[in-house]
Amino acid sequence: RQRQHELAPNVKGRPSQDKEWVALREWCTAQGMPKSKLTLAYFPDTFRGMMATRNIEADEEMIRVPEHMLMTASKVRREVLARASDNGLVQSSAWRLSEHQALVYWTYDQRSKLGLSVWDTYVNTLPRDFSSVPLYVLSGTEPASSLSVNTDAEKWVAEHLPHSVLLKVTEQQERLFNDWTCTCEVLTKFNIESPVDWRRYVWAWLVVNTRCIHLGRHTTGNQQSAISSQPSSAVFQPISDRDSMALAPMLDLLNHNCQARVSTYFDTGRRQFVIKTLRRYCKGEEAFISYGPHDNGFMLAEYGFALAENPHCALELDCKVEMWISTVKANLNTRRARATIKSTDVDALVDVLKQHGLWGDFTLFSGSAELPYRLQAAMYLVFAAMKPGAGIKGVISQWERWQRGENTSVSEEVDLAVKNWVSRTCSEVAEHSSKLLDNIQAKQNDDARGSECLDPFLVHCIRLIWTTINKIAIESTSL
């Protein structure tokens, strides 16, 4: 008993009595889902998640979901083809929706006919909105391939997101609009009503993007695979050779934790998908899965949250490096630089880095004692080529020997130039992030936001990201 007391968590959840949860639990039981040691509960840090009702030992199953309760694209396809047959149209070859597009359409359609579907209980438990996800805020009120930055709230979010996160959200908007367009075209061919409500479609798109599980290959019931993330995990495929993702009731209530360790498999005998924990959970403790080793920028863009303690946070300098390269080329074109290389030679250097797989992903991590290898490699190559009298071929040849470990020496001049660039760049980032943090603090202190009030949690997450960026930038000025 003393040992169990020592292992017991300090924070325990408060079991949920929400009518939606009670209805979901009863619905799952009626659908044949086996009982588990998990229940929905409220926690001080994660708000709502799955709590252990009894001790769950390491290597013990946490939850089982029957095959018929996993919604996949192949099921959506069969449903649409059946409806097309009723309309006198059977054109299976016209089905051109991706898995993501199909599941988004299904989610949209289910929301449109609440009260008429067997899935109503599950749909009622889905989030009403995604106000802490940047895409939800910036996707606008009408279909468009570009972000909406018209309202004060939209402008504030776009101006305060880190550049790398804003780029990711921009790419999401393009995919969102493409999915909408493609879905409308395909459904028209089947004489089925296409989505008409853009905001509802955005909601459905984010339901799938934030809550689906990703499937892998077929396996026997006793084979397992450890997974470290929800969206890229090896969840075994029980439905169809065409399926690689699914919406799964109950599973999408498990929150993320960087330290979570689970394995999954599909029990072919009982036709059930299983999640097993590889660590112990005490009664009252929240049970987790891991969405993967991602930084807070990725987490905010994809899932709408950020972690106060995230070991995977980093300062990304890709944008800074690209801007610097552009400046170098501009200076060469105007002949303000004394180097003997041309702007086209700089492009050739970038190509060399790409060929070696060393272009991009220039990141600095908290607590690093030296520059990351990728950043060193890029900087050493370009700065060496900028030295007066340097020949481009000779520089590349010498760099490749250094890269292979055949020549470990780098001139003090180049090494100093690289360190000065990093120190100067990190100082600029630290100054910029400090100003943004002041603005964010002012936003949080402002209680009069009117009708365009932002979700305070979104503002909080943006502040967490910039706080981490500021911390890493300050640390890295002395690398």
Image (cartoon, helix red, strand yellow):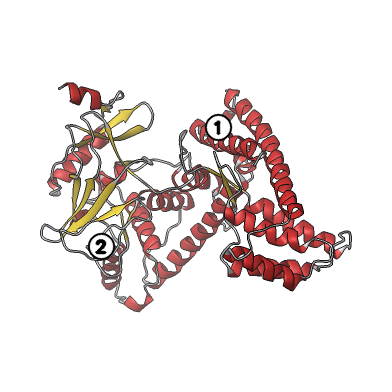
**Residue sitting at the far left:** 269
**Comparing labels 2 and 1, the label whose residue is closer to the camera:** 2
Question: Label 2 amino acid?
Answer: Gln
* Element at label 1: loop
Identify the residue under disc 2.
Answer: 237
> Could you say which is closer to the camera, residue 367 or residue 132?
367
The reply, left or right, for residue 475 in relation to residue 136 is: right
Residue type highlighted by circle 1: Cys
Q: In this rendering, does residue 112 appear at all?
A: yes
Residue visible at 33% across and 33% down?
48
Q: Position of residue 394 (x, y in %)?
A: 73, 71
Q: Would you name the residue on which mark 1 appears?
A: 453
Residue 401: x %, y % from top left: 63, 67
Separation of disc 2 and disc 1 at Cα? 42 Å
Screen quadrant of the C terminus: top right
Q: Is residue 301 left or right of residue 157?
A: left
Is residue 47 left or right of 38 when viewed as pictured? right
Q: Looking at the picture, tell me which residue is in the foreground, 410 or 57.
A: 410
148 or 391, which lies in front? 391
Which residue corresponds to the image point at 49% horizontal and 64% vertical from the top-left?
181
